[in-house]
Image: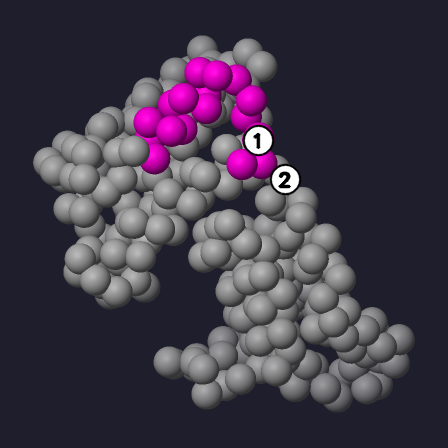
Amino acid sequence: LSRLDPPILDPTKGFAKYTLTKRLPAVIERVIHEQAVTGEQETSALRQLEGEIPDTALKRPMEVKEEDGQCVAADAQCFNGEWARWTDARKGAWTEALPLISTEMYLYRRLLDCTGYFRGGETGLVDPYEGQKAESLVAGMGSKAFQEAVSEHVAALKDPPVFKAMVGIKLRRFVHTDLWGNQGDLALSPMHIENTEAASKVSHTDKDDHLLQDESEAAIELLMAAGGKARVDFILDNSGIELLCDLLLADYLLSH
C-alpha cells in the first residue's frame, strides 16, 4: 500500500459527497442518539461539530498533554505535531480536506475532543462507541456464517489427520472470511446495524467475483512456507464481525 497514492475523490459527487453530507454527520448523530455522552457541554460540542460539515473551515484538534495520562511526552509531541501539520496543510473547508480517508480520521479525532475523551475526569477515556461495539459483537456472534466457520475450525481440530491434509484449503476459507468481515464497518452505515449482518452473509458465500484483486494465494503460500515461524500482525479498526473474523483466523494460524 505504501507504493500507492491514495485516491482523490471528487467531494461534490458520489461516495465522497455522501460521506461528507450524510455518513460523517450520521456518525455524530448516532453518538448523540444513543446518549453515549450525556453532559450538556459534550452534546453541545457534538452539535457544533455536526454543523461544521461540510463547509466550515477546519480547526486544529485539541492538544493531548502528558499530564492527562494519555501518553508520554514524546508521543504527545508527535501526536499533536502531526495533527497540526495535517490541519495547517489544508486551508479550507471539509470538502478540501483530501484524501477522504484522512478527513474521516479527522472527524473521529474531533469527536473525541467533543466527548471529553482527552480531558480526564468523568468523561476521560469514555468510549463514545461502546454501545455500538457491544451491539455489533452480539450480532456477529449470532450470525450463521460466523457460527458455521467456527464449527468448521473446531471439527478440523478434533480430527488431526484431516486438519493436516486440509490446512491450505481451510486457510484460504478463513482468509476470505476475514477479508469480508471488514464489511462490518460501523462507519459504513452508522445509523443502522444491518451492515454487520450483511457482512457475515458475504463472508459465508466467499464471492470471489466481488474482489477487484485477489492476492490471497500469494499470502497463503507465504504463510505456509513460513512453517509457523513467522510473525503475523493484524490491523484492526472495528469491533463486531470484523473482530470475530480476525480472532478466528488468528486462532487457526496459531493452531496450525
Tag 2 secondary structure: helix
The answer, for residue 205, to whether it is visible in the render is yes
* Picture quadrant of residue 35: top right
The C terminus lies in quadrant: bottom right
Point out the residue furthest to the right here.
158
Whether 212 is drawn above or below 75: the answer is below
Q: Which is more N-terminal, label 2 or label 1? A: 1
Residue type pointed to by label 2: Gly
Pointers 1 and 2 in contact (C-beta within 8 Å): yes
Residue at point 32% right, 39% down?
106
Instruction: Please tell me the numbered disc located at residue 36.
Output: 1
Q: Is residue 40 magenta?
A: yes
Q: Is residue 61 left or right of residue 85?
A: right
Q: Which mark is residue 158?
A: none
Relative height, residue 252 to residue 39 (above, below): below
Say which quadrant the N terminus sits in: bottom left
Main SS category, magenta section:
helix
User: Is 127 displayed left or right of 145 in the figure?
Assistant: left
**Residue 65: horizontal and vertical position, in percent?**
39, 16
